Amino acid sequence: MPKPKPTLRPPPDAAALRAAALSHLARYAATQAGLTQILMRRIDRWARGAADLIAAEAIEAARAAARAAVPAIVARLAETGALSDAVFAQARARSLARAGRSRRAIGAHLASRGVPQALAAEALPTGADHELAAALIHARKRRIGPFSKTPQTAETKRRTLASLARAGFAQSTAAKALGMDPTEADKVINEFRKEV
C-alpha cells in the first residue's frame, strides 16, 4: 500500500501566529523573549515540514514574512497586558524563593528566561531574612544542617556548606542557616512563607 502523500499546511501568517501566541499564553506564563522564541520555532517547524513539498525560495519568502510579523504580535500582546515581563518576573521570583532558591539562582533563572536585568532586580526578594529562609528551605529539602538526622562532623559540615554555596548562598548566610536549631529554623521558614 503506498504511503499517503503529506499535505502542505498554509504558511503561518500574522493571524495564525497571534492565535498560537494566545493559545500558549492561556496555558503557560511567558516573557516577551520566550514567546518570540516559541513563535520563531513554530515558523521553522512549518518550513521543515514544507521542505519537500514546495520550492525553497517560496519557503524562505513565507518564513521571512512570518518572522517579520512576530515582533508586532509580541509587542501588541505586551501592550494589551496579555504578556508582561514584570508580572512574570514577580511571580517566578516569588515561586522560586518559596522553593528555597537563592537570590543569585533566581536572578540567573530570570535572565535565562529573557527577563531584562532591571526587571529581574526589582523582582528579587530583598533582605537577609529572605535569603536565610531560602537557605533553610534548601537545607530542609536536602535534609542537611539543622534538618539532618546524622551527627555533624567536620567533613559533613564542609559538604553542607559546599551544597549551599553551589545553590548560590553566601558563606555567612549558609553558616547562619547551618548553625540554627531545627525549631528556630522551622519558625523562620513559616514566617517567610506567610510573607511571600
Image (tube, rainbow, N blue to C red):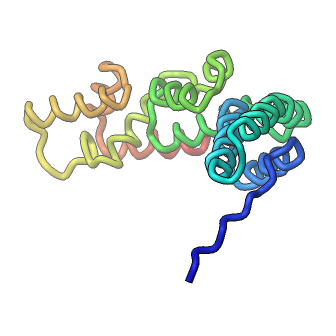
How many circles with numbers are drawn on the protein?
0
In the displayed structure image, the side of residue 66 where residue 129 appears, left or right: left
Quarter in which the C terminus is drawn: top right
- Between residue 176 and residue 66, name the one nearer to us: 66
Q: Residue at x 61, y 19 (%)?
A: 121
Q: Quadrant of residue 90?
A: top right
In the displayed structure image, the side of residue 70 where residue 147 appears, left or right: left
In the displayed structure image, the side of residue 99 where residue 93 appears, left or right: right
Q: Quadrant of residue 85?
A: top right
Q: Is residue 108 above or below residue 38?
A: above
Q: Position of residue 53 (x, y in %)?
A: 68, 53
Q: Residue at x 55, y 44 (%)?
A: 193
Q: Position of residue 98 (x, y in %)?
A: 52, 42
- Between residue 122 and residue 55, name the one nearer to us: 55
Quarter in which the N terminus is drawn: bottom right
Q: Residue at x 44, y 44 (%)?
A: 187
Q: Is residue 129 visible?
A: no
- Between residue 89 and residue 135, name the one nearer to us: 89
Q: Kindly give the residue lying farthest to the bottom in the view shown.
A: 1
Q: Position of residue 68 (x, y in %)?
A: 81, 29
Q: Is residue 46 above or below residue 178?
A: below
Q: Position of residue 87 (x, y in %)?
A: 74, 35
Q: Is residue 44 visible?
A: yes
Q: Residue at x 11, y 45 (%)?
A: 151
